[in-house]
Image: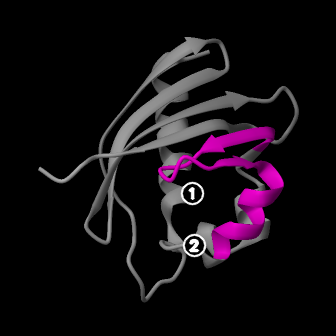
Amino acid sequence: MNVENSVAEAIELELQLLSPARRSSEALADQLLDPEFVEVGASGRRWDRQAMLAALPVMEGAADDGPQYVPSEMTGTVLAPGVVHLTFETVLDGRRARRSSIWRKSDDASGWRMYYHQATPVPDA
C-alpha cells in the first residue's frame, strides 16, 4: 500500500465530505461514512452514523448559497495499512475548529470511509 496515495485519497474524500454537494445528499454522504462511524462534534455532542446522515443535509455547510467550510493545514499520516489519520482546521461562518478524522479502507468495494471524526472549537483570539 502506497503511503502517499493513501493520505491523498483520504484528503480528497475529506474535502468531498466538506462540500455542500456531498453534505446535502444523504445518499452521497452515506458512501463515505463507515458502518461504525462516530463523531464528537464541536458542540460536544456524540453522533452515530444514522444521526449524522439524517442531520447533514440541514446542517450549516450543506447549502450552496449558505456558509461553507473552508479547510486549511490538512495533513495526514498512515497509522497502519488501510488506516489514515487526518488533521486540519476549518472556518465556517467565522467560527474556527480544529478537526481530526480517521479513515479506514474496507476490503470490499466500498473503499475508504470515515470511521471517526472530532471537532474542537478554537476560541476567539
Percent position of residue 87, x then y: 40, 33
Percent position of residue 2, x then y: 54, 17
Cα gap from disc 1 to disc 2, whole angstroms: 13 Å
Numbered-mark total? 2
In the picture provided, is 91 more to the left or to the right than 2?
left
Amino acid residing under circle 2 = Met
Looking at the image, what colour scheme do you see?
A: one colour
Residue positioned 47% across, 84% down in the render: 64
Q: Is residue 91 above or below residue 37?
A: below
Residue positioned 58% across, 74% down in the render: 21
In the picture provided, is 36 more to the left or to the right than 113?
right
Amino acid residing under circle 1 = Leu
Percent position of residue 55, x then y: 69, 68
**Tag 1's secondary structure?**
helix
Please check the rendered image and state whether residue 107 is part of the magenta-colored stretch, yes or no.
no
Answer with mark 1 or mark 2, whichever residue precedes in sequence.
1
The boundaries of the magenta stretch are 34-57
Q: Nearer the viewer, residue 74 or 109?
A: 74
Q: Is residue 87 above or below residue 59?
A: above
Give the position of the N terminus as an image quadrant: top right
For disc 2, the neighbor class at 10 Å (few under 14, some 14 to 19, many from 20) is few
Residue positioned 76% across, 54% down in the render: 31
Q: Nearer the viewer, residue 99 or 109?
A: 99
Q: Which mark is residue 59?
A: 2
Circles 1 and 2: CB atoms closer than 8 Å: no
Q: Nearer the viewer, mark 1 or mark 2?
A: 2
Taking the view exactly as shown, the residue that stands out farthest to the top is 80
Residue positioned 28% across, 46% down in the render: 122
Residue under label 1: 17
